């Protein structure tokens, strides 16, 4: 009996030893920063000299910060278009590629390739693709007699450009996630539905879509969190312009914190963004977990 | 109806439509790659030519030469490689140590600690960004700091400032734990009876069995490290320490109309991941499917 307890104690000691590096790093680079972010958002910390308690001043200042609310509006517009398209396209691709025909693997690979690119490289390539005069996109449009817009330089199309790049970069890996989900849907469901005379549309509505709800939940949650923290593409492709229509909250927080060194205020902005992300994730959770299908 | 739907002719038409559709999608997804490769080898006068020249009549390496001479891409390439490789080594080792402890060893705080780690994954990165800089700057005894963390610059402007915060990602711990759970426990008991030490059981018996999981995790960690942009840009001020992504961004910002070298630079930034993917394709697909199912 005593030896069993000794073994257990030895085991526990080993376990704590094994997790120590991970937990230590977690403490230093996640736990402490989270609490510090909250504290800093009530100070006027500026890196160089000041770190005084200013109470709710930063949060009061937020309310009148028109640029901040503009960036929120921008990123909401972006998310409202990007997230549904991301799901529809990845799901369609997944369903299309979910068969064992010859050559399908090659198609999957080609659709997956864009997800390997870094956001900076992708944005760089798309600056050139969307060039108003000599770019590929407008070149193709001119074949069918359309004069394309100036894309990244025009207020109406700048955000559309970012949506195009990010969709191009993200549908491939979500397609694979959906493929894995589709392969988990039991075949007999379709067979018995077909026996009952269900059409293809019925099969999708009553079998595929509900069965894929956990997958859709995962994909939509990840893309909402990512979309609301959009930065790289906006920074490289449009530099937040023209006229700030593609400036995002993370972009603004970066500038406020690291160019203007108003880190206290930037922390308050970061908290507001985090709350927005939380709210949207919860709404999304309600929607994808709802009993009735959303579509 | 049933017989009509299965005539060979109709089947043939269906298949043709399917393949044409899939090919069109794949072409659209692949076109940006083709276009940028093409541009990087075209002489300037052919880059700016309308209508589009789909096949260049002349090839040139000038753009690659220019990209590498105006910007030290070789150095940046090396920096990025060191950062990404260090990230892989740390995550594989620390992630599997902790993952093994959470999956195979019994200790009191196992469940609560693991839950805290998982819950923290939901915290958006932007919240911890600013305070993490503070933490890096004020780590005691690093980079000229005294015991209280003042006086020096800590780990700012050092590679460790990028490696350490990501050295044991929660995803790595979670991923490895899930894999260790699938391995049988009786080997562990046998080895204990034989008098094998706990660390050796982990290192010599269990770790070799996780090679496929390690490969997958390694690839994803490398890709994330290689492609990351915002955090390195914040931490590293010294131009000699810049990464490929930072160099590419600076280049495309400073030489906005030099599309030849810009595409050359972007392709160079993508190439390592592309090669990794072509060599180890199946691990990529396994990894995404895994995170999709478990998520």
Image (cartoon, coloured by chain):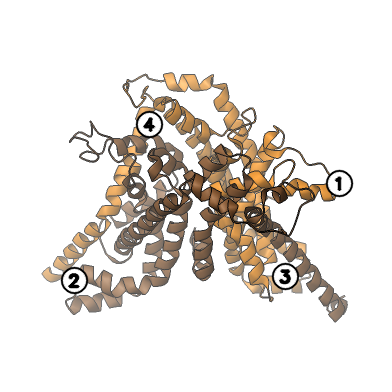
Q: Colour of chain B?
A: brown
CA separation in Å, label 2 and label 3: 56 Å
State yes or no: discs 1 and 3 in contact (Cβ < 8 Å): no
Q: Is residue B122 left or right of residue B12?
A: left
Seen from the viewer's position, the closer of residues A227 and B295 is A227
Q: Secondary structure at mark 3?
A: helix
- Mark found first going from the N terminus, 4 or 1: 4
Splitting the image into 4 quarters, where does residue B146 fall? top left
Q: Which chain is orange?
A: A
Image quadrant occupied by the N terminus of chain B = bottom right
**Residue on which disc 1 sits:** A145
Give the crowd class for mark 2: few <14, some 14-19, many >=20 residues within 10 Å.
few
What secondary structure is marked by label 4?
helix
Mark number, residue A193? 3
Q: Are marks 2 and 1 on the same chain?
A: no
| Chain bearing mark 1 | A
In this rendering, the label closer to the viewer, 2 or 1 = 1
- Label 2, label 4: how far apart the Cα atoms are: 44 Å
- Do tags 2 and 4 sit on the same chain? no
Task: Work out whether B82 lies above or below A40.
Answer: below
Q: Say the numbered circle drawn on residue A38.
A: 4
């Amino acid at each position: 009996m005593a030896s069993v307890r000794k073994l257990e104690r030895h085991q526990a000691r080993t376990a704590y030893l094994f997790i120590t590096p991970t937990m230590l790093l977690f403490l230093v680079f996640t736990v402490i920063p989270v609490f510090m972010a909250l504290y800093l958002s009530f100070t006027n910390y500026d890196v160089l000299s000041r770190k005084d308690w200013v109470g709710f001043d930063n949060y009061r200042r937020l309310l009148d910060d028109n640029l901040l609310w503009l960036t929120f509006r921008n990123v909401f517009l972006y998310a409202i278009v990007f997230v549904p398209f991301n799901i529809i396209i990845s799901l369609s691709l997944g369903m299309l590629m979910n068969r064992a025909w010859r050559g399908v693997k090659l198609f999957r690979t080609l659709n997956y390739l864009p997800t390997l690119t870094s956001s900076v490289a992708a944005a760089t390539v798309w600056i050139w693709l969307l060039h108003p005069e000599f770019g590929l996109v407008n070149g193709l449009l001119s074949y069918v007699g359309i004069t394309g817009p100036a894309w990244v330089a025009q207020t109406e199309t700048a955000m559309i450009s970012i949506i195009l790049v990010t969709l191009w970069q993200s549908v491939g890996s979500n397609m694979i996630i959906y493929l894995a989900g589709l392969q988990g849907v039991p075949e007999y469901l379709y067979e018995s539905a077909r026996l009952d005379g269900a059409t293809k549309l019925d099969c999708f509505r009553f079998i595929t879509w509900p069965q894929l709800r956990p997958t859709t939940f995962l994909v939509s949650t990840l893309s909402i969190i990512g979309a609301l923290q959009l930065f790289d593409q906006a920074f490289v492709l449009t530099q937040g312009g023209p006229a700030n229509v593609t400036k995002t909250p993370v972009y603004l927080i970066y500038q406020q914190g690291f160019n203007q060194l108003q880190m206290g205020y930037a922390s308050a902005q970061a908290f507001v963004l985090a709350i927005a992300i939380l709210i949207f994730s919860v709404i999304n959770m309600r929607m994808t977990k709802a009993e009735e299908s959303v579509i | 109806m049933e017989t009509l739907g299965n005539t060979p002719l109709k089947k043939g038409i269906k298949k043709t439509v399917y393949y044409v559709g899939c090919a069109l999608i794949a072409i659209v997804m692949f076109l940006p790659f083709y276009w940028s490769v093409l541009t990087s080898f075209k002489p300037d006068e052919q880059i700016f030519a309308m209508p589009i020249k789909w096949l260049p009549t002349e090839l040139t390496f000038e753009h690659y030469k220019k990209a590498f001479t105006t910007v030290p891409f070789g150095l940046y390439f090396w920096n990025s490689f060191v950062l990404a490789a260090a990230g892989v080594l740390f995550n594989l080792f620390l992630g599997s140590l902790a993952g093994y402890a959470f999956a195979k060893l019994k200790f009191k705080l196992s469940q609560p600690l693991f839950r805290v780690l998982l819950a923290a994954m939901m915290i958006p990165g932007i919240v911890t960004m600013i305070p993490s800089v503070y933490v890096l700057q004020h780590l005691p005894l690093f980079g000229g700091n005294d015991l209280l963390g003042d006086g020096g610059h800590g780990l700012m402007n050092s590679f460790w400032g990028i490696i350490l915060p990501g050295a044991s990602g929660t995803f790595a711990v979670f991923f490895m734990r899930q894999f260790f759970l699938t391995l049988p426990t009786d080997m562990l008991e046998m080895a204990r009876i034989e008098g094998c030490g706990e660390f050796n059981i982990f290192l010599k018996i269990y770790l070799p069995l996780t090679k496929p999981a390690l490969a997958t995790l390694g690839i994803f960690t490398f890709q994330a490290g290689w492609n990351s942009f915002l955090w390195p840009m914040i931490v590293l001020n010294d131009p000699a320490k810049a990464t490929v992504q930072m160099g590419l961004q600076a280049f495309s910002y400073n030489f906005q109309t030099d599309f030849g070298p810009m595409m050359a630079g972007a392709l160079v930034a993508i190439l390592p991941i592309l090669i990794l993917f072509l060599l180890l394709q199946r691990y990529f697909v396994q990894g995404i499917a895994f995170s999709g199912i478990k998520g």
